[in-house]
Amino acid sequence: MTRSLRARLFIGLTAIILLAGCVGGVFAYIWAFDEAIEMQDSILIQLGSLLQNGSVKSEQSLRGVDADAQVDVVELGTAPRGSAEERQLWSFQDGLHLASRQGGSMRVLLRTRPDGSRFAVAQRTAIRDEIARNMALRTLLPIAALIPCLLLVTALVIARSLRPMVRLAEDLDARRADDTTPLPLAGTPSELHAFIASMNGLLERMTLMMDQQRRFVADAAHELRTPITALSLQAENLAPVDLPAEARERLAALSEGMRRTKHLLEQLLALARHEAGPCSEAAVVPLDRTVKDLVADLLPDAARKGIDLGFEMIEPVATRGEPVMIAAMIRNLIDNAVRFTPRGGRVDIGVYREGNDAIIQIEDTGPGIPSGDIDRIFEPFFRGSRPSEEGTGLGLSIVKRTVDRLEGSVLLKNISGAEQTGLRATVRLPAADESRV
């Protein structure tokens, strides 16, 4: 059984139209058939009246009546005579009767003239029925032509009536995962208002739940940052101490774990700040200077891996936004490129203006992103399908949210060629007037 509301409506209305058309066609056929029979009786009566009054002679009538109707005039005289069929006709009273003549059923009209002579106007019932059927069938042609037109109109009306539901579904599909804006009631059919109200209630409950989750994450990250920082300081204080090799390895593992935990907490706090809304008024941010400062901070990490981190192109360009958020967004992209680029690789950065857009492009020689992960790479806590990958799964989510808030776009594209493989991240932001920095 079909689950489509559109199909069920169309099938139901089609069945009703076909049933109504068939029932109406049967009644129209019967009515038209009876009317055609009565019309032919009227013709016989008119011919009888003309012959009775002497307006038409019987010889003229035999030649003047429509040949397809096969109407015959039988003179019976003033007394019974002739064949048994003619004597039988004489025995009938004036009027319409059914009789047998020449081995077939006939419809006859008996009339008596003023001089006492009688005559019969006869027509074969088979001819009458054939003429009536043809006329009745012609009355069915408009109904037969109307049914396909009604089916087409029904399909169009159903499609148009369900279009608000399709638009509503398209609106929901086009939304971001965190967009809980209530669905509009304006311009929608009243039958959908209860459904939309229920959806808006669900979205409101989801908003409250997401707010509670954000507050919990922010509070937990804030509370954990202090003890983790204290532990990191204690581990740093142990660095000058003369320790056995095994203890030194364990201390290094502990320091690396705390570094990763601290980085996770910073990312969680950054994500909470993004989802809570803008914290300060937007300012003009010089992207070239910001990227230079970030590259200088990450150069030691790149040097330890033997990675060539530098600029392929850098031009003075600025955008408008919150400096801390923009710096965190760019740092995440560069940090990802350095982290996933193998030893001896290269990370090239470009900062330039293209029309009304400020472009930040970061290209590495790493493994790129698996094709199955590219559609989910901006989801929070998604770390990809490679088991060897490290990270919190929040960096690219923060990048996406920051870029969306700045009304820009970010594109990640794998580089696959004979000479180089890797990943190219391109961020487009609305350019601002740098003279106002």
Image (cartoon, rainbow, N blue to C red):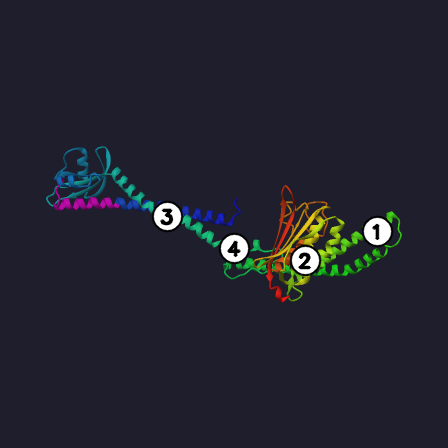
SS type, badge 3:
helix
Quadrant in the picture for residue 229: bottom right
Q: Locate residue 337 relative to residue 158 in the image: left or right.
A: right
Judge whether residue 150 can be spotted in this image. Answer: yes
Kindly report the distance in space between the C-alpha atoms of the residues bearing marks 3 and 1.
88 Å
Question: Which amino acid type is shown beneath numbered disc 1?
Answer: Leu
Q: Residue at x 75, y 52 (%)?
A: 301
Between residues 10 and 247, which one lies in front from this camera angle? Answer: 247
Residue tagged 3? 146
- Between disc 4 and disc 1, whose residue precedes? 4
Kindly report the distance in space between the C-alpha atoms of the residues bearing marks 4 and 3.
32 Å
Question: Which amino acid type is shown beneath numbered disc 3?
Answer: Leu
The quadrant the C terminus occupies is bottom right
Residue tagged 2? 291
Mark in the foreground, 4 or 1: 1
Judge whether residue 213 can be spotted in this image. Answer: no
SS type, badge 1:
helix
Residue tagged 1? 251
- Residue 233 is tagged as none
Kindly report the secondary structure that dominates the magenta region of the rendered protein. Answer: helix
Residue tagged 4? 167
Q: Is residue 42 magenta?
A: yes
- Between disc 3 and disc 2, whose residue precedes? 3
SS type, badge 2:
helix
